């Protein structure tokens, strides 16, 4: 396991470590010092690899060599070759300089073997050709706690930087697409600029609250556009107009999500140790799906209940409700539907008509209005007016297509049956489909009217 972790450590030193020990006999330590591992360059000032005074640099854990912050790989190579130390998962270290300084101090207090796993190279070779490398990784609890603490400190600094940007009254930004200017005297000017580009130019780089070091981010994007480079596919074009047409037609007015250069500008990438925004988002999506499954696992479907036309009684089926209305109110809906030959839409209009009259406390049998539904119900039951429907033209009107109550479940239980269609035919309410008159000549040849005319002619 330790050997596998070594492969993932220190991107710059991986090939060198493998190359020095791949052969059976191995390469001696003295010979390895003569290997050229990278392009050489002459020093610009005395001191060799020692950094210029005042520039940010990182010291070696074991010696006095210093390396510039942007040459982290050179330091890792140096510690592998000169001191046999491999640091695993360097990319997960939030603050590399603090990390190195911490272990530089600790290694002066205790032996390296108290902290590092020992990896023996060429273990089958003679003893003088064997070599030991030391692996420093987060399997060690102290290293793990250090990485987490550096991550928290880094997140704190990022949030403080973001807050400073929000309170900055000296901000001056220019839209990358229309050159409109935004100044710091407005409320959260950076957010206004980002929202402007998203709204007016369909260029959305994310929520303003998730972005940090906004000025540097915008400058980075502007530099790419000035170099005639598409922000999404990152191809370079011959002139500005060609680039604009390309980004518009291909819908490339967005950044490349796979470009890790942009990760440092998003707060989400600082939230959890060793997790990118994609991994955090994937976990959130999975958690949401898990919660949805939990929320619906105990779901019990409840049947919708229909309400009586005259009182507050509810029933789960129309059959039960019809029995109740017949027994309690002497209103037989199924009998009325059959006798009048009502189709589905006529049933809907009749139900909505009755609902509206009852809601308005008006008896549809005698048109008398009452003060309450209770008085109306008493009157209709005593006067036998529940079954005294007005003429069809009174309720069979288009206005009653619209439900009186928005959640009237009774309307959903109405249906056309075979008996309904038979009654409909008996009442002469047969739907007639007109013939296609687009081909009039062919219609005259095949129309049924020809047969009727022929029959009439034979009779005469």
Image (cartoon, rainbow, N blue to C red):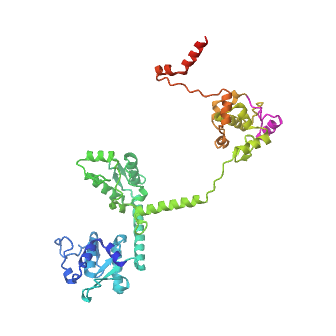
Residue at position x 25%, y 81% in the image: 82
Location of the N terminus (image quadrant): bottom left
The quarter of the picture where residue 397 lies is top right
Answer yes or no: is residue 432 visible: yes
Answer yes or no: is residue 167 visible: no
Between residues 200 and 241, which one lies in front from this camera angle?
Answer: 241
Q: Is residue 265 above or below residue 43?
A: above
Location of the C terminus (image quadrant): top right
For the record, the magenta segment spans 368-390
Q: How far across and how far down the image is residue 214, in percent?
A: 36, 58
Residue at position x 39%, y 56% in the image: 169
Residue at position x 49%, y 20% in the image: 445
Q: How far across and how far down the image is residue 379, in percent?
A: 81, 36
Between residues 153 and 85, which one lies in front from this camera angle?
Answer: 85
Between residues 190 and 170, which one lies in front from this camera angle?
Answer: 190
Please check the rendered image and state whether residue 380 is part of the magenta-colored stretch, yes or no: yes
Please check the rendered image and state whether residue 432 is part of the magenta-colored stretch, yes or no: no
The quarter of the picture where residue 270 lies is bottom left
Q: Is residue 175 above or below residue 429?
A: below
Q: How far across and how far down the image is residue 232, in percent?
A: 32, 53
Q: Is residue 453 above or below residue 168?
A: above
Q: How far across and how far down the image is residue 285, in percent?
A: 47, 60
The quarter of the picture where residue 416 lies is top right
């Amino acid at each position: 396991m330790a050997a596998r972790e070594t492969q993932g450590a220190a991107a710059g030193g991986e090939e060198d470590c493998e190359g020095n020990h791949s052969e059976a006999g191995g390469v001696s330590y003295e010979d390895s010092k003569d290997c050229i591992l990278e392009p050489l360059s002459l020093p610009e000032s005395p001191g060799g690899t020692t950094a210029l005074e005042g520039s940010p640099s990182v010291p070696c854990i074991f010696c006095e060599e210093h390396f510039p912050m942007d040459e982290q790989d050179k330091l890792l190579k140096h510690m592998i070759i000169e001191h046999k130390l491999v640091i695993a998962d360097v990319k997960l270290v939030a603050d590399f300089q603090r990390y190195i300084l911490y272990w530089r101090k600790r290694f002066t207090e205790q032996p390296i073997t108290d902290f590092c796993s020992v990896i023996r190279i060429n273990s089958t070779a003679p003893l003088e050709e064997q070599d030991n490398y030391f692996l420093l990784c987060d399997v060690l609890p102290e290293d793990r706690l250090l990485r987490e603490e550096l991550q928290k400190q880094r997140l704190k600094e990022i949030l403080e930087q973001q807050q400073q940007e929000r309170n900055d009254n000296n901000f001056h930004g220019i839209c990358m697409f229309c050159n409109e200017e935004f100044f710091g005297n407005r409320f959260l000017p950076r957010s206004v600029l980002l929202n402007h580009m998203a709204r007016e130019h369909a260029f959305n780089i994310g929520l303003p609250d998730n972005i940090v070091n906004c000025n540097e981010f915008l400058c980075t994007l502007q530099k790419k556009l000035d170099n005639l480079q598409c922000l999404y596919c990152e191809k370079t074009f011959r002139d500005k107009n060609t680039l604009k047409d390309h980004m518009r037609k291909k819908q490339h007015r967005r950044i490349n999500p796979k470009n890790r250069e942009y990760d440092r500008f998003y707060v989400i990438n600082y939230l959890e140790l060793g997790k990118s925004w994609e991994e955090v988002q994937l976990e959130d999506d999975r958690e949401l799906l898990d919660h949805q499954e939990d929320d619906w696992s105990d779901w019990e479907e409840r049947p919708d209940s229909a309400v009586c036309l005259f009182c507050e009684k509810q029933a789960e089926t129309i059959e039960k409700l019809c029995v109740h209305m017949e027994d309690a109110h002497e209103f037989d809906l199924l009998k009325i539907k059959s006798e009048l030959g009502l189709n589905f839409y006529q049933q809907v209009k009749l139900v909505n008509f009755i609902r509206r009259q009852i809601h308005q406390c008006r008896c549809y049998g005698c048109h008398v209005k009452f003060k309450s539904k209770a008085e109306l119900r008493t009157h209709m039951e005593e006067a036998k007016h529940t079954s005294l429907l007005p003429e069809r033209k009174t309720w069979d009107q288009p206005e009653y297509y619209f439900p009186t109550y928005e959640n009237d479940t009774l309307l959903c239980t109405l249906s056309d049956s075979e008996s309904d269609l038979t009654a409909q035919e008996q009442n002469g309410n047969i739907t007639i489909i007109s013939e296609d008159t687009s081909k009039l000549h062919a219609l005259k040849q095949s129309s049924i009217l020809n047969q009727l005319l022929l029959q009439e002619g034979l009779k005469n």
